[in-house]
Image: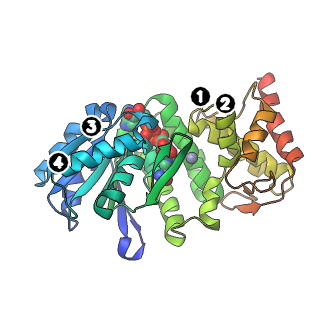
Amino acid sequence: VNIPVQLGPRSYRIVVEVGALDRVGALLADLDVGRRAALISDPAVTRLYGERVLASLSGAGFSVTPVQVPEGEGAKTLAVAEASWDALLTAGLDRSSTVLALGGGAVGDVAGFVAATYMRGINFVQIPTTVLAQVDASIGGKTAIDHPKAKNVVGAFHQPRLVVSDPAIVRTLPDREFRSGLAEMVKHGVVLDASYFAELERDAPALCVRDLPALESAIAGSCRLKAGVVERDEREAELRAALNYGHTIGHALEAATSFGRWTHGEAVALGMTAEARLAGRLGVATNDTVSRQERLLIALGLPVRATTVNVEGVLQAMGHDKKARDGRVPFVLSPALGHFQIVRDVKQEDVRAVLETLVESGSHG
Ligand SMILES: NC(=O)c1ccc[n+]([C@@H]2O[C@H](COP(=O)([O-])OP(=O)(O)OC[C@H]3O[C@@H](n4cnc5c(N)ncnc54)[C@H](O)[C@@H]3O)[C@@H](O)[C@H]2O)c1
Ligand SMILES: [Zn+2]
């Protein structure tokens, strides 16, 4: 499947296909780029997929320098970016060269940042290897490293020239990592497309066992939805804000538990559960809209309960949200599947009430 992303002179395509990993070289050769490239990856992903990508690239005539970065969030530091710039210079990469990111969102973010800044920006190709990276992080051109005081605060917009997503790659992910990515798919369905949501409902059992046709279809569908948002709104504004669904409460849950208790996707699943209930409580959404979301999350093995969470701590974390004003944050709510609405005047007592339901529903099964 080929998904075009129309951004004028920065247009590119997302290729979603089982086996696409072996076509990276040929796909890159179709672009007008130089022969030198750097392949940025982490040790775990390199062990699993490094050789195949290198073989594909050298088979297509590219001379590739492998660059290793640490696994996970530890890759997103200035020191890692600096070591990568060093490696690019040593290998003689020039303005016509390409940086390829092979890994999850963390590798994609730091490699994208390196590509955005090296010689004021060179060609960048994403080969995302987690569900989250395939359906979310690799699309949209956001690149970043972390600051010791805050995540993602140093970065640049830099669109890739190409994204290659091979659904078979995500079959080697640990279970929690895999399911976490599915939460972002659910998010896309809830706020953007009711028929995509229904596809996820129908395919939930197949997705859980990582059936390839189901994965390919769900990943491609999600990429199409996110690409559509990015096309209409390349820099953050109202439409892109829709993609924050589940994240206002989700981020606060992560922050209140020092990012150690849930994966990002699990926190987003809880956030969507709470925000769906908030929409129900405020009379914005019907019970059916609320309960279908919970049922789908459960079917995908994602949490909808947060036993023993400190509700006041979560409310406090929400007050520190970048988008907060006078302690109130705007919420993205879904009045009906496939639709969203931004609600700015939600009372704290309503947020507290839905957070309490997340905890309560844990005490009786
Ligand atoms: N730029 C954006 O728009 C955007 C959007 C969302 C998230 N992000 C960023 O993405 C990051 C999270 O990304 P993530 O969830 O992909 O996690 P990750 O990049 O931290 O990777 C998680 C782990 O999975 C391993 N792994 C990756 N692919 C694998 C595979 N196919 N098989 C086995 N193991 C594999 C990695 O080695 C790593 O240890 C965060 O830093 C977040 O800020 C960026
Ligand atoms: Zn997210």
Residue 257: give its label.
2
- Whichever of labels 2 and 3 marks the residue nearer the N terminus, that label is 3
Q: Are marks 1 and 2 in contact (CB under 8 Å)?
A: yes
Q: Which residue is mark 1?
A: 260
Callout 2: helix, strand or loop? Answer: loop
Q: Which residue is mark 3?
A: 49
For image coordinates 60% across by 46% down, the residue present is: 201
Instruction: Find residue 38 and report its horizontal and vertical position in percent.
Output: 23, 49
The answer to which quarter of the image holds residue 183 is: top right
Q: Is 57 on the left or on the right of 130, as rendered?
A: left
Q: Is 59 on the left or on the right of 66, as rendered?
A: left
Per the model, the C-alpha gap separating discs 2 and 4 is: 42 Å
Q: Are marks 2 and 4 in contact (CB under 8 Å)?
A: no
- Whichever of labels 1 and 3 marks the residue nearer the N terminus, that label is 3
Q: Report the amino acid beneath label 3.
A: Tyr
Query: Visible in this render: residue 121?
Result: no
Q: Nearer the viewer, residue 79 or 186?
A: 79
Instruction: Find residue 337 and report its horizontal and vertical position in percent.
Output: 69, 57
For image coordinates 21% across by 59% down, the residue present is: 97
The N terminus lies in quadrant: bottom left
* Mark 3 lies within 8 Å of ligand 1 (Cβ measured): yes
